[in-house]
Image: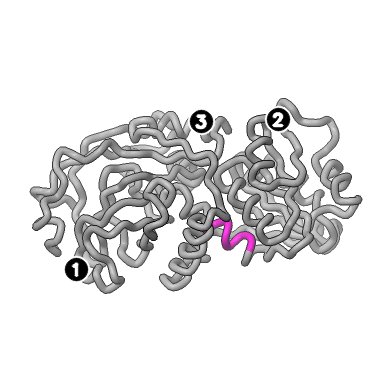
């Protein structure tokens, strides 16, 4: 996909699945956009847990691959037909659920790019889009949060957990958060958590579900947002009130064992769903609507990113190790070094191959 004259760039490349050490910073040709695609100079790329699944091989991808499912930057070239989606060279854009962000330049389908409004900087756009749209569908579609409801959020001090906590609170829900450290507890409470339960080294001997019921008058919660998976699922189910729902939106600790449907009946006619962002931004109209609402709430200060860690591109492997070890607070974005050996010249940028 390279085109002579566009130069070379830094990119983090995965040649075979495995641990963080498989991520290697390499010099690669700047890619050229094909039909319906845009070349974006990456200002920042968000790091998400799904990147770890892709790197490890849990979610197979064609190799070699540049990871990074989320990013923001500036359009530098358009392929044939890409302008049909209203894009312009020089426009600031962001994207989610498209690989290639761990690099100085990325080729992205034009229909998957969303404009970044003037009130949002590139770093913020890269940090919030994927997890912000995920939080949006979780609280509006997977389980529409109602005022006064008790909701349990597992691992509430991660990037998604903090956004979820804020959004549930905005909708009038009462958040019970689980976190592993005192520092993470402070973040969860700042995001709006009414109650915080510790796990890990500081965990109580009392089962989580018993603690949840003690905080809800014995009733249990209306919903559990669980992105942890194997380690938390049983207690998530046990924390529900009758007709409550576990929204299993991730598996950071590993996949959940098969569930006997009869256990849902025995627990109180419970519900279980395993959603994915892909199915909630299937068409461009839905993608733009969710992105606009996320950016609007951020611009108005109603959704905050209080813990965003900027890291250089060459630290991608280290960031993956920290994320897997739950040593990350909030959100991490990778920032490529300023420029490549040579940016596309203006006439090259505007040419449609």
Q: Position of residue 57 (x, y in %)?
A: 45, 42
Main SS category, magenta section: helix
The local secondary structure at tag 1 comes to loop
Question: Which residue in the protein does label 3 denote?
Answer: 322
Residue 80 is labelled as 1
The local secondary structure at tag 3 comes to helix
Q: Position of residue 22 (x, y in %)?
A: 38, 32
CA–CA distance in space, label 3 to label 2: 16 Å
Tell me, yes or no, if residue 292 can be seen here.
yes
Q: Position of residue 226 (x, y in %)?
A: 66, 49
Magenta segment includes 100? no
Q: Which residues are magenta?
A: 133-139
Model colouring: one colour
Tell me, yes or no, if residue 58 can be seen here.
no
Q: How many residues crowd around disc 2 within 10 Å: few (fewer than 14), some, or many (20 or more)?
A: few
User: In the shown orientation, is residue 175 left or right of residue 265?
Assistant: left
The local secondary structure at tag 2 comes to helix
Assign the C terminus to one quadrant of the image: bottom left
Earlier residue among tags 2 and 1: 1
Relative height, residue 323 to residue 194 (above, below):
above
Q: What residue lies at 39% left-to-right and 50% top-to-bottom?
A: 121
Q: How many residues crowd around disc 1 within 10 Å: few (fewer than 14), some, or many (20 or more)?
A: some
**In front of the other: 53 or 129:** 129
Magenta segment includes 137? yes
* View extreme (top): residue: 201
């Amino acid at each position: 996909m390279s085109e002579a004259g566009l130069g070379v760039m830094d990119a983090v490349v995965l040649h075979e699945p495995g641990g963080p050490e498989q991520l290697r910073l390499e010099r690669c040709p700047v890619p050229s956009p094909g039909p319906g695609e845009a070349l974006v100079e990456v200002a920042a790329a968000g790091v998400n847990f799904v990147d770890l699944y892709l790197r490890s091989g849990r979610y197979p991808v064609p190799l070699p691959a540049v990871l990074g499912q989320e990013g923001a930057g500036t359009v530098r070239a358009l392929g044939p037909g890409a302008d049909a989606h209203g894009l312009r060279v020089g426009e600031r854009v962001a994207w989610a659920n498209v690989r290639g962000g761990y690099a100085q330049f990325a080729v992205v389908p034009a229909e998957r790019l969303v404009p970044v409004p003037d009130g949002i900087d590139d770093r913020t756009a890269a940090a919030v889009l994927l997890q912000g749209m995920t939080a949006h569908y979780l609280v509006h579609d997977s389980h529409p949060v109602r005022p006064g409801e008790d909701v349990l959020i597992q691992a509430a001090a991660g990037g998604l957990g903090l956004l979820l906590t804020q959004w549930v609170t905005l909708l009038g829900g009462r958040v019970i958060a689980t976190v592993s450290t005192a520092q993470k507890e402070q973040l969860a409470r700042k995001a709006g958590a009414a109650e915080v339960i510790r796990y890990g080294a500081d965990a109580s001997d009392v089962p989580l579900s018993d603690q949840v019921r003690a905080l809800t008058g014995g009733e249990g919660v209306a919903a559990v947002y669980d992105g942890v998976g194997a380690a938390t699922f049983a207690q998530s189910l046990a924390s529900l009130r009758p007709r409550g729902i576990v929204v299993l939106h991730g598996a950071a600790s590993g996949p959940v064992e098969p569930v006997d449907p009869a256990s849902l009946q025995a627990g109180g006619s419970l519900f279980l769903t395993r959603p994915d962002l892909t199915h909630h931004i299937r068409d461009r109209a839905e993608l733009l609507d969710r992105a606009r609402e996320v950016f609007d709430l951020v611009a108005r200060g109603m959704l905050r990113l209080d813990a965003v860690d900027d890291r250089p591109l060459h630290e991608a492997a280290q960031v993956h190790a920290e994320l897997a070890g739950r040593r990350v607070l909030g959100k991490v974005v990778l920032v490529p070094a300023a420029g490549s050996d040579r940016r596309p010249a203006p006439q090259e940028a505007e040419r449609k191959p």
